[in-house]
Image (tube, rainbow, N blue to C red):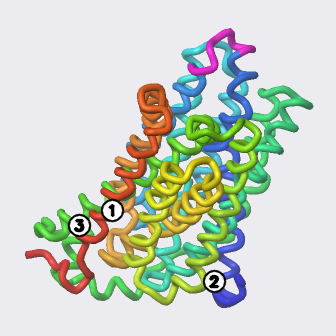
Amino acid sequence: MLLSLGRGTVRVVVPLGLAQTLAWASSYYLVAMLAEPMARDLGVATPTVYAAFSVALAVSALVGPGAGRLIDHHGGRPVLMATNVLFAAALAALGLVQNALALFAAWALLGVAMGSGLYEAAFASLVRLYGQRSRNAITGITLMAGFASTVGWPLSAWLESRYGWRGACFTWAGLHLLLGLPLNAVLPTAGPHPDAASSGTPAAAAAAGDLPPGRSVWVASVLLAFVFAAAWFISTAMAAHLPRMMQAAGASLSVAVAVGALVGPAQVAGRLLEFGLLRHVHPLLSARLAALAHPVGAIALLLGGPALAPLFVVLHGAGNGILTIAKGTLPLALFGPAGYGARQGWLMLPSRVAQALAPFLFGIVIDSLQAGALWFTAGLGLAAFAALLALRSPASMHPS
């Protein structure tokens, strides 16, 4: 399947996809396996470790726009290589912490690496290389890195059982220097992009930040930022509380765990659908369909009971998988490649904040509403769908 990208693109997508798998496995997916042993060893409550992880997500939100601007100016290769060093330093610092203050500081440093080295940076790097032709490459990256939890969770658990949580952190740090750094070094050096020739137009200049954008561009940006924030709130809330949510809806614990295991395959299936059938339609249409998936599944579960839990999880996972791709392709389709990296950072800033708050806030919603909490996420998904309906085609989005 990746060969359909073209040989030259595959030489970029495969190393970058592997580097992204490492980056996600050693940061976003690290806390699930190491939070409890960290807490025991440091003498703090497990929620304290998750609070430090939330700080990392908040820091990553603040770092994103600046990292994107660097990629716009210098290309992805030097920035992503620098993030491997940052990841290594942060993970080594995490392995050395002795108290809660140092724990928060280490996670904050890891947040800097996350904000400049995860999907948004990878997408901006591809757009810097391929411009409007980046859609399939972005999909290829997400297909590969979609297995980050499949690789990261078992490996972190094994390392922790064999060498302790500190040894696990040091191992991940070493992998960034021994594996991640050479993989990102393979990326081509970005020169002036052919699409930059159009940067003299008012629309492109506004998008690049050279002119104040017109009202239509601002409105589209706000709508898109809301869509991504809503989608990532739902995604993170479900990742943190899915088994509990299934039980509140009437499923047994064993069924909840078994059904929850369908999320990963469903996400990959959604990305394969995007790579196959949906790549022939505008990203706005595929994003609208994806935004509907969670609400449709949630309403089916609420009305049909636990028997429809597999349908809910499959729809939720597939929609989330497609929206992950839309996070990279939709801003490109609507605004073009000029200034993509910085814009991507600003668009995703609310999403990172939503990610940081989702586990705590949705836990309160479940405590109050039990299964009815799904009406909340379904409503949020429908609001995102409505925002996507309000977005207009690129031809109508020139600054007024």
Q: Residue at x 68, y 9 (%)?
A: 43
The x, y position of residue 300, in whole percent, is 51, 57
Magenta: main secondary structure: helix
Q: Answer with mark 1 or mark 2, whichever residue precedes in sequence.
A: 2
Residue 343 is labelled as 1
Q: Quadrant of residue 210?
A: bottom left
Magenta part of the protein: which range? 40-47
Label 1 sits on what residue type? Answer: Arg
Q: Residue at x 76, y 53 (%)?
A: 150
The x, y position of residue 25, in whole percent, is 69, 48
Q: Please, what secondary structure does the residue beneath circle 1 have?
A: helix
Q: CA distance from mark 1 to mark 2?
A: 24 Å
Alpha-carbon neighbours of circle 3 within 10 Å: few (<14), some, or many (≥20)? many
Q: Please, what secondary structure does the residue beneath circle 3 have?
A: helix
Camera-nearest residue between 73 and 12: 12
Q: Are marks 1 and 2 in contact (CB under 8 Å)?
A: no
